[in-house]
Image (cartoon, coloured by chain):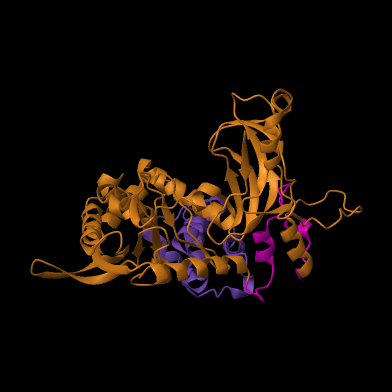
Amino acid sequence: MSAEEIKEIIIREILEIAPEMSEGDIDSDAHIQRSLEIDSFDFLRILTALNKAIGVEVPEADYGKVDTLNHMVDYFVRHLEKR
Amino acid sequence: MSTFVMPSLGADMQSAVLMEWKVKEGDRVKKGDVIAEVETSKGVIEIEVFEEGIVEKILVPEETEAAVGTPLAIIRGLDESSAAEEEQSAPDMAAETKEAEPSPVPIQQVSDEPVEPDEPQRVKSSPLARKKAKEAGIELSALAEGDKPVHLAQVESQKGSVTPPMGGMREAIAKAMSRSNAEIPHYYLSTSINMTSALRWLEEQNRNRTIEDRILPAALLIRAVVHVLREVPQLNGFWMDDQLQLSEAINPGIAIALRKEGLITPALLNAEHMDLDATMRSFTDLITRTRSGKLRSSEITQQTITITNLGDLGVERVYGVIYPPQVALVGFGRIMDTPWAEGDALSVRKVIQATLAGDHRATDGRTGGEFLNKLDQILQRPEELL
């Protein structure tokens, strides 16, 4: 899976949770939860969906490493490479 | 023989659209069965029946708006004979039967849209959703998932937010909060709770769980509140007829913000019987159904206390407004890294501000203080909440 594909999947899952947003509203370097008003419940739902789609489970201790869209893409790319 | 009427799903509700019957004439129903779906300003609500019997007659067709109190169906007790037999054997019963017939005044057929003949399969939706979709130029078929009916909330979420959506909900909140502020003499208490060990414990728990089974701190807080309410029951109940009426069931209304606008506080029913896992599962289920507009009538009418968690918004402390006739609201702010003195050492700890808004007619600060104190204590021993 390429970084581009991963990014697309993440955006899709975010928009699933926040349907009133569009792709243009997502700033790749902004804090996802704060900038898109995603609460901890919805954030967990996004991570659950991403685990299903990409097959990488983000432990709670790593939440700080997936706070922005770019960080999230990096995180998933790194973990897929490790395999 | 009894008449099932359109229930009041909040003091503000005047009418609702009967969307779909879940039973048909001749069906046997028991207490708690969902018999119909109605659309209100709070979304689609599944309404439940509170007796056992047979659905004798359905009085109102689907997609009909009916005022609160309008007879919707006649339910015959299990030991009663059917109306037809009864009429023959006891003609003086006719008066009562007649009374149960729908009064033509409050019922208003709003399904004025004819079925479009060129549409091979008509998308099911409420008349209101259909009307709004038409106004906004949205194709209902684009919103349909399978053959499930399209709800107003789906149409609203597609629409640009030019006019504030959920006008009915705003109105409902306005009425309840005005009444609260006019009638309830609030008192407010606040305490700082060190969450460091509870969060560490939770992280430990979650490490051994799959992501689907992970427990959020919000669920732990709900569980802790419910646990303490068993010891301080005076905060769980209603102020009615000038006195405090305690509730045996603990049904915390969980304030859930809708992404678009507005707020619903549906009840986590009988939370006193739930362990931590069950609390998290029910919490997940409740949020999901609230946001998709699929709550049960009991969930929006039987709250016994409210819990508001505004921590995700970065708020430090919540000063709540009690939802009448409830007598208390528990608020949680953000969990913050805070300087914390223990003995003569100063360190940085994860600290949350827990607040209590109490109805001073029902309880005094002493009760509220006892509640917050016990809440702090139990959160230092989170393993007891499992």
On screen, residue B186 versus residue B367, left or right, reads right
Quarter holding the N terminus of chain B is top right
Give B62 or A52, whichever is nearer the viewer.
B62
Give B28 or B230, whichever is nearer the viewer.
B28
Quarter holding the C terminus of chain B is top left
Q: Is residue B196 above or below residue B75?
A: below
Q: Position of residue B52 (x, y in %)?
A: 56, 31
Q: Colour of chain A?
A: purple
Total count of labels: 0
On screen, residue B260 versus residue B214, left or right, reads right
Asked if residue B29 can be seen in this view, the reply is yes
- In which quarter of the view is residue B21 placed? top right
On screen, residue B211 versus residue B85, left or right, reads left
Say whether residue B137 is magenta. Answer: yes
Say whether residue B212 is magenta. Answer: no
Q: Which chain, by letter, is orange?
A: B
Q: Position of residue B209 (x, y in %)?
A: 39, 45
What stretch of residues is rendered in magenta? Answer: B136-164
Q: Position of residue B274 (x, y in %)?
A: 38, 42
Residue at 8% x, 69% y: name it: B344
Asked if residue B209 can be seen in this view, the reply is no
Residue at 23% x, 58% y: name it: B367
Q: Position of residue B260 (x, y in %)?
A: 58, 68
Q: Check the image and name the residue furthest to the front.
A: B92
Give A82 or B67, whichever is nearer the viewer.
B67
Q: Check the image and name the residue furthest to the right.
A: B118
